[in-house]
Image: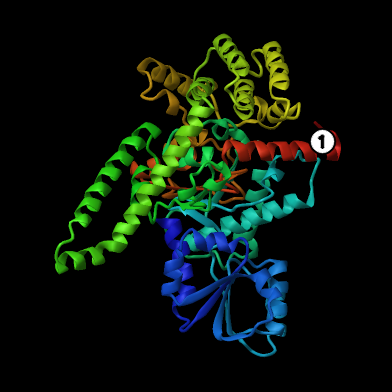
Amino acid sequence: MVLVSAAREYVNRMLQDISGMKVLILDSQTVSIVSVVYSQSELLQKEVFLVELVDSISKSKESMSHLKAVYFLRPTLENIQHLRRQLANPRFGESHLFFSNMLKDTQIHILADSDEQEVVQQVQEYYADFVAIDPYHFTLNIPSNHMYMLPAVVDPPGLQQLCDRIVDGISAVFLALKRRPVIRYQRTSDIAKRIAQETSKLMYQQESGLFDFRRTEISPLLLIVDRRDDPVTPLLNQWTYQAMVHELVGIHDNKVDLSSTGKLPKDQQVERLYLSSEQDAFFKANMYENFGDIGMSIKRMVDDFQQVAKSNQNIQTIEDMAKFVDSYPEYRKMHGNVSKHVTLVTEMSKIVEERKLMLVSEREQDLACNGGQVAAFEAVTNLLSNESVSDIDRLRLVMLYALRYEKESPVQLMQLFNKLASRSPKYKTGLVQFLLKQAGVDKRTGDLYGNRDLLNIARNMARGLKGVENVYTQHQPLLFQTMESIIKGRLRDVDYPFVGNHFQQGRPQDVVIFVVGGTTYEESRSVALQNASNSGIRFILGGSVVLNSKRFLKDLEEAQRIAKSSTNVV
């Protein structure tokens, strides 16, 4: 509950002490921050009758002096300019200004100078500068996420903006938790090191007073890692409910947009479905379950609903009618829930069938988890020739093969590159090579395939002998190993150095792992299951975006394009 509760508490505090009719004014990022933790009906209960974006409010001249304006904005230059103009010609009776992060002194002076009519009642910093999509998983929704992949020689101005946004997001999480962490980073990543050092400078030098919570227990750990250390996880098809919805349809701020599939019947034109573990009991119970089990759970839910629907048909007395009216909102909610999950699962089943994903995914899992280069080459070659396999699936198979066998079979790798170019010409040549340059074996810190470290080799052999329960979900993200190493106190200083002279005294109780380049729902599932196992450590996962294979490949293509045009490095 930790992150969702913290963000909700901030929104509560903004709204509860201001009586009367209110308009809530947000920016393009805070609208995501609020929407994942607060529903529209809850806003109405707090007398918020209008929600507007700060840039569209600027365009309107209509006076609304009967409303009190509650602004919740990121403290950016652009937002301060919007506020300046709005305070110079105020449209609302009162203005209450809340910022999601630290304001600079100069910004406070600009706001004070603009408020000539003294409509501003308060200016506060409420540190909800992160999108709390699940209790232990947050994202920052950074549009220019591809920047983290650019080679060091290409240092565009956007890279500093990316770092600044990540530092802001991480610092807000720790201010919300009221803790100051010890910071470690992945040694092989320049950007992870840069973000770790800038975060440390902010927490221990520039704003040390703000982060000094005078707490005696062991400091939490902040570990900053790079997505390129595990490029396999975002490339795989997923078979657990939440991860699968994101992979096949897409989830943004806990909303699923089905209009993009274009296959919904007319009577079901639900453009957006809301999937939140906080507000949907069925989703909360099943979000980490396998696709096969979801079908059975949905059948049980449909049966339960039919029982309720039947009992509602037997209305014979006034008492029955009164009972029905009382239970009607719950009935409507249940009906909406049943129809939502049935629609989603039906849609995903169609996609699985059309793209032959069971066939493709079995091969992907083999490439990610098991050795055997000769058999793998043959299987990938066959799938590249299969007409039913889509372009994106062909590309992912070649990438997974290349990541695993880049050193073992360069000749066969070239054959696969050529075959991919002829079968799926829509992908730019060199994209797989660019991935290897970015995230190949020489660039990675972790033991991605469990073949560097003796302990991991032994564990993999044992797993091979024991067999796996489900061939489609046998893969475990590298993050799982990282968490195990932290629990056992085996995270090596040489691979994950500390920043400055702040070291860990004993085992931390709270660990925030931030993935520069984005997290996946498979990893957030690993974190949730680890937290449920009561190891004594609470893990929180954060990232610049939430990836599926489509977004990961889009970032890769964009980074390749910029790197080529800037320096011809690639």
- Against 122, residue 529 (above or below) is above
Front-lying residue, 475 or 423 = 423
- Against 413, residue 300 (above or below) is below
- Against 287, residue 164 (above or below) is below
- Asked if residue 501 lies left or right of residue 421, the reply is left
Residue 368 seen in render: yes
Front-lying residue, 23 or 565 = 23
Front-lying residue, 11 or 382 = 382
Q: Position of residue 425 (x, y in %)?
A: 73, 25
Residue at image position (79%, 46%) is 155
Q: Residue furthest top?
A: 374
Dot 1: element: helix
Q: How is the image coloured?
A: rainbow
Q: Position of residue 64 (x, y in %)?
A: 60, 84
Locate the N terminus by quadrant: bottom left
- Against 531, residue 446 (above or below) is above
